[in-house]
Image: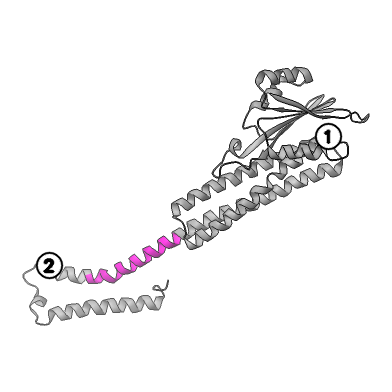
Amino acid sequence: MAEKLIFQTNYSDHNYKWVDAINPSASELEAFAMTYQVPKNLALSCLEPDHMPVVHQGEHYVYIVFRSYDDRAPIHADTIHELTRKICIFIGEGFIYTIHRSEMQWYDDTIDEALTCGQPHTKDSLADFILNRALRTFETPVLALSRRIDGFEEAVFLRQKDNLALIKELFYLKRKIFLLRRLLNSSQEVTEQLPDIRTETQHHELNYYCTKLVYRYDELAELVTSLMSLNLALSDHRTNEVMRVLTLFSVFFLPVTFIAGIYGMNFEFMPELQQRYGYPICLSLMAITIGLLYLWFRRKGWLRP
């Protein structure tokens, strides 16, 4: 485990230290729990890769699990573990302890910004600061997902992709958006359950920011759902057009086939077969039947696209 002291304050009103740990083992987490007097099961829960955002308030500590978006996630990633990275925050008497499994650029930037802020942070405002920066990571995929949805809209209307491949792409996109939206809903619940450890304005800002992100992902979810429905509707429309054309051809040739079937029967007593003009009369009857059907369909408007 790479454990390091970020900084330590000596102010009378908020004397504490900030310690950061990267990729700890189970034994190291047990040692941490014993040293800082936090429940061992909470410390070991930091090893769970798919842990959703949650806050747990003890008698002498606050335990917060939060997640940030991983900008290195594969384009078809659709699980919590693939899309996000977890950070655990323990806040107790005289310390704030952060735990995460790997290096994260946004977190390194947060540390640099906190160290160069120029004004002392309380433990609570520092935790609020970290959570705020974690939420900011979800802004980047909003723009990327919006651009992808715009591209899929053109593909749906212009049929630039095979329909099966398009449905598959939309399915992955829908799963990703719904997963991120569910994750942000859990994050919003965390912001609402946090104890009164910060000023009313700061608490409101964090909760409001999370609500705004949830609203933006709701919009994306509605767009991709509508796009999938539109794609299915257009596919059904094209299928109906093909069926309409085939039906019209069938109706045109049904009476012709009926007439040809009658005079193709090999009965001995069929006087029409002996007529000199029987063949042209039969062809004329077929042509008149098709013509009358065409005029009727045209009058009904069934031949229009």
Residue 26 shown left or right of residue 195 in the figure: left
Look at mark 1 in the image and give the residue it sits on: 124
Front-lying residue, 53 or 140: 140
Q: What element does badge 1 sit on?
A: helix
Disc number at residue 300? none
Q: Residue at x 13, y 79 (%)?
A: 278
Residue 303 shown left or right of residue 32 in the figure: left
Q: Quadrant of the N terminus?
A: top right
Residue 170 shown left or right of residue 137 in the figure: left
Front-lying residue, 24 or 232: 24
Please tell me how many numbered marks the rendered image carries.
2
Q: Is residue 28 magenta?
A: no
Residue 8, picture quadrant: top right
Residue 39, picture quadrant: top right
Residue 226: percent from left, percent from top: 56, 56
Residue 157: percent from left, percent from top: 50, 62
Q: Is residue 247 magenta?
A: yes
Above or below, comparing residue 210 to residue 121 in the picture: below
Residue 61: percent from left, percent from top: 80, 26
Look at mark 2 in the image and give the residue it sits on: 265
Above or below, comparing residue 208 to residue 254 in the picture: above
* Amino acid at pointer 1: Asp
In magenta, the rendered stretch is 236-256
Q: Residue at x 77, y 47 (%)?
A: 208
Q: Is residue 196 visible?
A: no
Q: CA distance from mark 2 to mark 1?
A: 96 Å
Q: What element does badge 2 sit on?
A: loop
